Image (tube, rainbow, N blue to C red):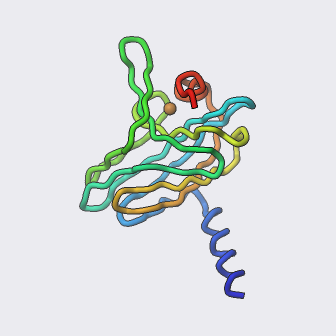
């Protein structure tokens, strides 16, 4: 009986409504979504709003998802007329700082080695690892969106 209750609690946490901001020791994760992908596309972009409501600096260090072989933190910016993207090992969040990820600028999360295409309406579980706040689970809603440099071209610059 106990194990069944635990299972139910776990399932409920996985499918908790996305629209509610989730708090873990001062970091609020909100508005998470991933871009729909087409068959054959091996990576997809995901975006979140992270707000550090605590009094101390924290940082997002890594992320994991059961839908992808690995998850990377990326940043992108224009260099001349070329959009360049690189992996970062942390996304710093000063006390009070809010980072809003969006396609084509700043930070994003990359789901690498997708096990199946992401379809609009799907829910993608994502585990975030913060330096001080620890692990935090969230769900990304998959949305259709027009292709941008950070959605679909990763196969060209990531050789793994
Ligand atoms: Cu990327």
| Residue at x 63% of width, y 63% of height | 14
Query: x, y (%) of residue 110?
Result: 53, 38
Task: Give the left or right position of residue 47, taking residue 8 as reference.
Answer: left
Q: Nearer the viewer, residue 140 or 85?
A: 85
Asked if 1 appears above or below 94 in the picture, the reply is below
The quadrant of the image that shows the N terminus is bottom right
Taking depth in this image into account, of 96 and 83 the one nearest to the observer is: 83
Q: Which residue does the image show at 67% across and 33% down from the upper left?
A: 37
- Compared with residue 31, is residue 87 higher up or lower down, i.e. above or below? above
Q: Residue furthest front?
A: 160
Q: Position of residue 115 (x, y in %)?
A: 70, 42
Residue sitting at 53 percent across and 60 percent down? Answer: 137
Left or right of 57? Residue 27 is right
Q: Is residue 144 above or below residue 81?
A: below
Residue 88 drawn at (x, y percent)? 39, 38
Q: Going 70% across and 46% down the picture, which residue do you hit?
A: 121
Q: Quadrant of residue 125?
A: bottom right
Q: Residue furthest bottom?
A: 1
Would you say 148 lies left or right of 8 here? left
Quadrant location of the C terminus in the rendered image: top right
User: What residue occupies the far top of the structure in this picture?
Assistant: 81
Residue 49 position within the rendered picture, expressed as x and y whole percent measured from the top left: 44, 47
Q: How many marks?
A: 0
């Amino acid at each position: 009986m106990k194990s069944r209750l635990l299972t139910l609690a776990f399932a409920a946490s996985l499918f908790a409504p996305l629209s509610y901001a989730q708090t873990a020791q001062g970091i609020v994760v909100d508005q998470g979504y991933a871009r729909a992908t087409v068959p054959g596309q091996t990576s997809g972009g995901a975006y979140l709003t992270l707000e550090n409501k605590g009094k101390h600096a924290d940082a997002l260090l890594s992320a994991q998802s059961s839908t992808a072989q690995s998850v990377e933190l990326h940043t992108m910016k224009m260099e001349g007329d070329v959009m360049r993207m690189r992996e970062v090992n942390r996304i710093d969040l000063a006390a009070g700082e809010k980072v809003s990820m969006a396609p084509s600028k700043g930070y994003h999360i990359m789901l690498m080695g997708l096990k199946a295409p992401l379809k609009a309406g799907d829910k993608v579980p994502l585990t975030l690892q913060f330096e001080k706040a620890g692990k935090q689970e969230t769900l990304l809603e998959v949305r259709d969106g027009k292709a941008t440099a950070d959605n679909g071209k990763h196969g060209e610059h990531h050789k793994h």
